[in-house]
Amino acid sequence: MKKDIVTLSELSEEDFEKLFKRAFELKERHKKGIRENVLAGKTVGLLFDKPSTRTRISFEAATAQLGGTPIFINAKDTQLSRNEPVKDVARVLSRYMDALVIRTYSQGLIEEFAEYSSIPVINALSDLYHPCQVLSDIMTVIECKGACKALKIVWVGDGNNVANSWINAAAVIGLNLVLACPEGYFPDKKVMEKALEKKCGRITLMSDPAEAVKNADVIYTDTWVSMGQEQDKEAKQKAFGPFQVNAELVKKASKDVIVMHCLPVYRGYEMTEEVLEGPSSVVWDQSENKLHLHKAVLEALIIG
Ligand code: CP
Ligand code: NVA
């Protein structure tokens, strides 16, 4: 049966481990200049309805570096923009390509694509989740710290799509995840409830960032205003002031804390320039690892 990655909850702990192992191997081979050919003759579609620097380009590069051909599809240039049913587009694209990477607003749309496609569907961000981001982020945590399970991982800021995917990952592989978000901006309630039902890992919600980051091994933040929320910008900037990741906050964490951000970053809002460019920041490694992890995802889903 074909496999998709639309939430992260469809993966087992073993799937996570296999992806990390292969991504590290592929990273090492890439550094040595070894050429891969596992996707020779395969075509990967990238259907995007929101902007992207990292996710789009790393998936395109990953496909090309594995010997396959990426095809970028701007959703606005397709008949989807004139209400062609998703179930029709999904079946048509399945006749042309070997996997489909989708970035859009509605999680439901990605799930409908997965249901009607006969090829693997990969969520490259929806309003609800950003699963591949969190996969490559955990790879970065393992790379920097040697492991991820014994660590205190602290999310500071908006309970958004990336936070929801961290919650899903924590529930599959058993992480100690603390989320500090302003009242009214907690992660999705259903996502939280489902994760807690699994009784795997420790997931804690709070509204005090200073308390949350005590002894943190990882501090993670993201923009306060996600794509599609531009109308809430002013209200959010007011509510999120105390949640800025700055030197004072980072000082309260473990002394060898790493600071993460999926990027793009808004300097002076969710993170200061000093922290972003400081010694604890691993944001550029995070961005690089998207390339290697995406290769592992494409290979696992297309080749098996
Ligand atoms: N982190 C991330 O998904 O970045 P892009 O929006 O540039 O793809
Ligand atoms: N939460 C952000 C992530 C961008 C990569 C957004 O959805 O815009």
Image (cartoon, grey):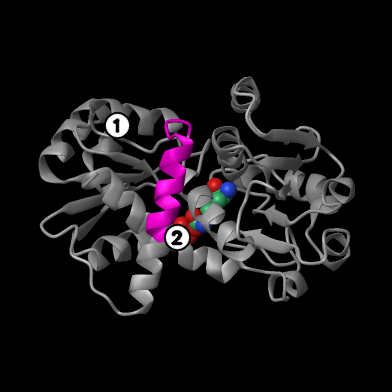
Q: Position of residue 103 (x, y in %)?
A: 40, 45
At x 81%, y 51%, the residue is 243
Of labels 1 and 2, the one closer to you: 2
Q: Secondary structure at mark 2?
A: helix
In this orientation, which residue lies closer to the viewer: 175 or 237? 175
**Image quarter of the C terminus:** top left
Which of the 4 image quadrants contains residue 173? top right
256 vs 61, left or right, is right
Magenta range: 9-23
Residue of label 1: 113
Residue 133 drawn at (x, y percent): 50, 51
What secondary structure is marked by label 1? helix
The residue carrying mark 2 is: 290
Q: Main secondary structure of the magenta part?
A: helix
Residue at 38% over, 64% down = 25
- Using the image as rendered, state which of residue 281 and residue 88 is in the foreground: 281
Quick check: 64 above or below 277?
above
- The image shows residue 296 at horizontal and vertical percentages of 35, 54
User: Is 18 inside the magenta-drawn segment?
Assistant: yes
The mark that comes first in sequence, 1 or 2, is 1
Frontmost residue, 143 versus 278 = 143
Mark 2 C-beta to ligand 1 under 8 Å: yes
Q: Which mark is residue 207?
A: none
Q: Name the amino acid, label 1.
A: Phe
Please state which amino acid type lies under the numbered disc 2: Lys
Decide: few, some or many residues near mark 2? Use Cα within 10 Å; few <14, some 14-19, many ≥20.
many
